[in-house]
Image (spheres, grey):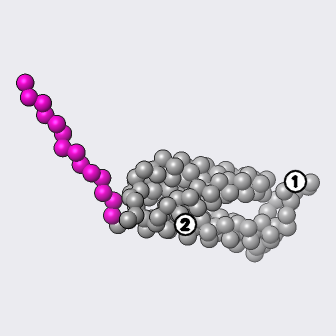
Amino acid sequence: MSQQTQPVTERRHSGPASGGTTFAGVLLIVSGVVMIFEGISAIAQDDIWVRLGDYVFKFNLTAWGWIHLVLGVLVLVVGAALLQNAPDWARVVGVALAAFNIIVNFAWMPYTPVWAIIVIAIDVFVIWALCRSWGEHPKRA
């Protein structure tokens, strides 16, 4: 009786990102765009937001807008870098920004609960996808 072995195929990645990295990159871009829109609307018009009483994380709404705008741009840039198959720095920064984004949106939740929960869910999936697909990334020589 003879044994048959399957040929071993080596997974090579070149060019744009693949798998979980693409998923995380797209989600980071979506999260960044949502954060940018939240930031712009908070900076432009304070009147559209809910007025809160005593809130532990109460900032001026314009300050929250700038926080969201800057964080949104950073998240968008890292998402685009992940889609271009950036080195490991983009993965580490992506996980760190997504974690920080979760904290910011948790504090932002009394102002826009639905959008904050959506962004938190997106960021949880980003962290999962980046950590899960860490082995898919090609090593640079």
Above-or-below relation of 128 to 89? above
Q: Quadrant of residue 29?
A: bottom right
Q: Looking at this rendering, what residue extends furthest in the right direction? A: 54
Q: Which residues are magenta?
A: 1-14
Assign the magenta stretch its main secondary structure: loop
Place of residue 87 in the rendered image (x, y in percent of width and height, measured from the top left): 47, 64
Task: Point out the image quarter for the N terminus.
Answer: top left
Quadrant of the image containing the C terminus:
bottom left
Near-viewer residue (5 or 66): 5
Q: Is residue 6 left or right of residue 107?
A: left
Q: Give whichever of 46, 86 is nearer the camera.
A: 86
Q: Residue drawn at (55%, 53%), measured in percent from left and top?
A: 126
From the image, tell me which residue sits under label 2.
Answer: 78
Mark 1, secondary structure of its residue: loop
Under mark 1, the amino acid is: Val
What residue sits right under mark 1 in the picture?
Answer: 56
Q: Is residue 53 above or below residue 83?
A: above
Element class at badge 2:
helix
Displayed quadrant of residue 14: bottom left
Image point (12%, 30%), residue name: 3
